[in-house]
Image (tube, rainbow, N blue to C red):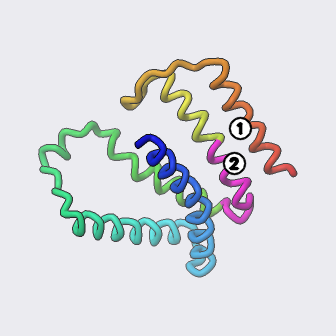
């Protein structure tokens, strides 16, 4: 089971620069990165709706939705920010440079979330090997963008 989970994450990661490139090209036709982001989110929302309908996923109750903490509703805003930034920076940094900085940022944020247990993540304290890995990725991002 674990190899399949890791493969799925690997494929999702491999599709990130493809998404950035597609959305950046869409920006060229629509003329505005925020408009391209909106179109991307609308198409994504329609794809998710189709998946929900095809799989007959039950809708949550209003009470369940209302019981969620206020901050849980900001995930979509963070996603919109991410998509807009990738659209703006994709062709400026190139696919490799963009993904290097995104991955470095993801790891820094992830180490902080794991260390504190924020948002419900299991606590995984910072260790020297973990920090070394994050630093190597950070400096790798610098190298990828400079050379």
Dot 1, crowdedness within 10 Å: few (<14), some or many (≥20)?
Answer: some
Calculate the distance from the C-alpha at mark 1 to the C-alpha at mark 2. 8 Å
Check contact, mark 1 vs mark 2: CB within 8 A: yes
**Which residue is at a point 40% across and 47% down the rendered structure image?**
75
* Marked residue nearer the N-terminal end (1 or 2): 2
Q: Is residue 67 above or below residue 121?
A: below
- The residue indicated by pointer 2 is 100
Main secondary structure found in the magenta portion: helix
Q: Quadrant of residue 18?
A: bottom right
**Which residue is at a point 39% across and 31% down the rendered structure image?**
119
Q: Given the current orientation, which residue lies at the most extreme bottom position?
A: 29
- Secondary structure beneath dot 1 equals helix
Q: Is residue 5 above or below residue 120?
A: below
- Secondary structure beneath dot 2 equals helix
Residue situated in front as seen by the camera: 77 or 104:
104
Q: Which residues are magenta?
A: 89-103
Residue situated in front as seen by the camera: 62 or 138:
138
Which mark is drawn over residue 5?
Answer: none
Residue situated in front as seen by the camera: 102 or 88:
102
User: Magenta span has 96?
Assistant: yes
User: Magenta span has 39?
Assistant: no
- The residue indicated by pointer 1 is 137
**Relative image position of residue 35 (x, y in whole percent):** 50, 71
Residue situated in front as seen by the camera: 134 or 2:
2
**Relative image position of residue 118 (x, y in whole percent):** 42, 27
Dot 2, crowdedness within 10 Å: few (<14), some or many (≥20)?
Answer: many
- Asked whether, in this view, residue 144 is left or right of residue 84, the answer is right
**Relative image position of residue 41 (x, y in whole percent):** 43, 65
Q: Is residue 29 above or below residue 93?
A: below
Q: Is residue 116 above or below residue 100?
A: above
Which quadrant, please, contains the N terminus? top left
């Amino acid at each position: 089971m674990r190899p399949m989970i890791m493969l799925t994450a690997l494929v999702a990661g491999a599709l990130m620069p493809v998404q950035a490139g597609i959305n950046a090209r869409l920006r060229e036709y629509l003329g505005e990165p925020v408009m391209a982001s909106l179109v991307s989110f609308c198409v994504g929302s329609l794809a998710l709706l189709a998946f929900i309908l095809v799989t007959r996923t039950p809708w949550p109750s209003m009470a369940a939705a209302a019981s969620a903490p206020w901050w849980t509703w900001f995930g979509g805003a963070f996603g919109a920010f991410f998509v807009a930034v990738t659209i703006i920076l994709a062709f400026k940094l190139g696919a490799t440079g963009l993904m290097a900085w995104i991955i470095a940022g993801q790891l820094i944020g992830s180490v902080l979330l794991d260390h504190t247990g924020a948002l419900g993540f299991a606590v995984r304290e910072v260790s020297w090997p973990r920090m070394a890995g994050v630093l190597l990725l950070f400096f790798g991002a610098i190298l990828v963008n400079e050379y």
